[in-house]
Amino acid sequence: MSSLLDTLTQERLLKDRDAAAELVRHGEPPHVSLLRLCDAGLLQGGLSVAYGVRPDELMGPLTTAMGGPARNLKVVDVRERPVLELHVQAGDVTEKWEVEDLSVLVHNLNDLYRAAPDARSIAELGEWEDALQLWCVDKRTLQRFARQPFFAPRNARDLRSRTGD
């Protein structure tokens, strides 16, 4: 079985293999190494989101990282009470989303762009160094990663349902 760094290099998902090699610790579980790489900004499509960032504040960076049609998503209104509510427009579709936290935002964006082959899916890798680690990954890559020991996102079940696995 190839190493985490070999796999990420082969998939062209590492920004700097040498820096990544210095960061990954021998004997560390591979999913922990992936969190560490995301936090260090070494994953293509990776985002490290500090606690306290609101879903409406994350929308721009996240949809940019998703790419494809997600880049054209517009937030047309934000309501704060009783729960944060985003009014979003994607082409001719307008939706209201209640987003109590970032996980709900991730779910809604993945759901909205489920059928868009050129929009990356968002994997919620977990928390590391007081930040949520998110990784926007091509849907075909998700299928290949589904059974890899390093790929253990919190929303794995949701991602598997989107890739047909």
Image (cartoon, rainbow, N blue to C red):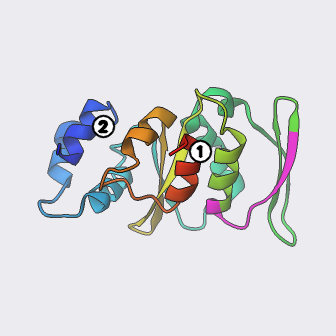
Q: Residues within 10 Å of mark 1 (few under 14, many from 20)?
A: some
Of the 4 image quadrants, the one containing the N terminus is: top left
Left or right of 21, for residue 49: right
Residue 138 appears in view = no
- Looking at the image, tell me whether mark 1 or mark 2 is earlier in sequence order: 2
Q: Judge whether residue 99 is colored magenta.
A: yes
- Residue found 86% across the figure and 36% down from its top: 93
- Residue found 46% across the figure and 64% down from its top: 131
The one of 138 and 88 positioned closer to us in this rendering:
138
Q: Amino acid at mark 2?
A: Leu
Q: Amino acid at mark 1?
A: Arg
Left or right of 41, for residue 110: right
The residue that disc 2 covers is 14
The one of 162 and 135 positioned closer to us in this rendering:
162
Label 1, label 2: how far apart the Cα atoms are: 24 Å
Q: Judge whether residue 21 is colored magenta.
A: no
- Residue found 59% across the figure and 28% down from its top: 117
Q: Position of residue 126 (x, y in %)?
A: 45, 63
Q: Position of residue 59 (x, y in %)?
A: 67, 47
Q: Position of residue 74 (x, y in %)?
A: 78, 37
- Residue found 68% across the figure and 28% down from its top: 69
The answer to which image quadrant residue 113 occupies is top right
Q: Position of residue 12 (x, y in %)?
A: 32, 30
User: Over which residues does the magenta segment extend?
Assistant: 94-103
165, above or below 129, in the image: above
The residue that disc 1 covers is 162
69, above or below 149, in the image: above
SS for dot 2: loop
Q: Residues within 10 Å of mark 2 (few under 14, many from 20)?
A: many
